[in-house]
Amino acid sequence: MKKVKVATVWLDGCSGCHMSLLDMDTAIISLSRKIELVYGPLVDAQEFPEDVTVTLVEGAVSSQDDLEKIQKIRQRTQILISMGDCAVTGNVPGMRNSIPVQKLLQRVYVDGAEEKKLVPSDRVPVLLKQARPVREFVKVDICLPGCPPPSKAILGVINDLLEGKKPDGNFKVKFG
Amino acid sequence: MPQKKLSIRIDGELISALEGQTILQAARANKKYIPTLCALEGLTPVGACRICLVEVSGSERLFPACTTPIQEGMSVITNSPRLTRYRRITLELLLIERNHVCAVCVSNGHCELQAMATAFGISTVELAYNFPKLSLDMSHPRFVLDHNRCILCTRCVRVCAELEGAQVWELISRGIHARIVSELNEKWGNAASCTSCGKCVQACPTGALAEKGRAVEEMTKNLEAVTSLVHRRGVQA
Ligand code: SF4
Ligand code: FES
């Protein structure tokens, strides 16, 4: 059987969703026989491949770089899954949304710093005005909330997709 | 004075209820479930949240079960695709209006809004999040008011006025600008009429009113403390 191409992406999140993804114990062995992980923080690939079947996105869209990434990923993915509250609602990254970006950077990197008081401008992605849910930028096919979503829920969705089933509400969703 | 009995139907089942009861009271007395957020046993219903909307045959419009009195021969539908659609929209509007960041909320896992979203299988919202800038009142020695989590159900207002008799809480402004305020917009800590009884905290369905010193997930509410008082005093619920 040809393996299904799966990718994961880490935007503005804490990597907790990726931890939860890895937390599926022995199920990961049987899953790895069915899927090929082609991109993401867990593998080496530099460039997002052209023809990915399923992509799991962790994190809100928070920077110019996140935005460019997610647009490209959307074009190259059949089924896009928002994994976790940051991707689905904005969650913790979104808590900065009522603070103007310049004020925020000043507070963190200048007022809040002990030394080298300087707002980074070089080689770091420019922040967007707000950190917002993935769905507000590109079409999302499945939302899987939770902070993080339980490992079983992530596995359940992937397995349903592998079996060609529509994973509509088979999992118990819960924000937080 | 013995109350008159009325016959109504709830989801097709013939039920005998007391005149003066609301649809919600009649339904609950007969173990029929209608989802609610702002209604609380023993407090005057106000119809603020609109989760309890039901269909009444013969009418196109929907009625809030918590404020609508029953009438002889009334036939009520508590569940339908149309009601589910409206209830979901209502929940979504509540979720996007303020900053309900469940993951870092003191009431995570014990919140009525969160539980209701789960019950309706809400995995995302259709509308854009509002992300308003809202304040926190930490001035009270024992309690916190976090406007980010408030759904304007006014349970705090009513429990304070009707059970404690203190009338600390009020609602100011309208629509999206509406806010809960203590004592004519004074800081809660300066509110001389507050008895620090904590009934508002226990009655609040979300993490908007909480005890100080509670970390994420630690604020469990004791609704029993409020409703048992209602029963002891024999308040007609
Ligand atoms: S503070 Fe709590 S009880 Fe009061 S209106 Fe807001 S959500 Fe309701
Ligand atoms: S419970 Fe009836 S409107 Fe809120």
Image (spheres, rainbow, N blue to C red):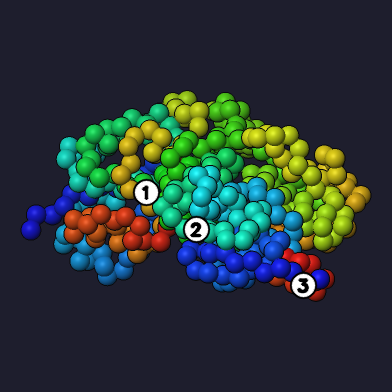
In the structure shown, which secondary structural element does the residue marked by tag 1 occupy? strand
Task: Chain letter for mark 2, please.
Answer: B
Residue pointed to by mark 3: B2
Distance Cα–Cα, label 2 vs label 3: 28 Å
**Are the residues under badges 2 and 1 in a single subunit?**
no
In the structure shown, which secondary structural element does the residue marked by tag 3 occupy? loop
Residue pointed to by mark 2: B77
Left/right placement of residue B215 relative to residue A12 reads: right
Amino acid type of the residue tagged 1 in the rendering: Cys
- Please name which of the two marks, 2 or 3, marks the residue nearer to the observer: 3
Left/right placement of residue B121 relative to residue A31 reads: right
Number of the label disc, if any, that sits on residue A143 = 1
- Please name which of the two marks, 2 or 1, marks the residue nearer to the observer: 2
Q: Is the residue under label 3 in contact with that under label 1 (CB below 8 Å)?
A: no
Residue behind label 2 places its C-beta within 8 angstroms of ligand 2:
no
Q: Position of residue B178 (x, y in %)?
A: 70, 37
State whether residue B144 appears in this view.
no
B49 and B160: which one is in front? Answer: B49
Task: Chain letter for mark 3, please.
Answer: B
A145 and B54: which one is in front? Answer: B54
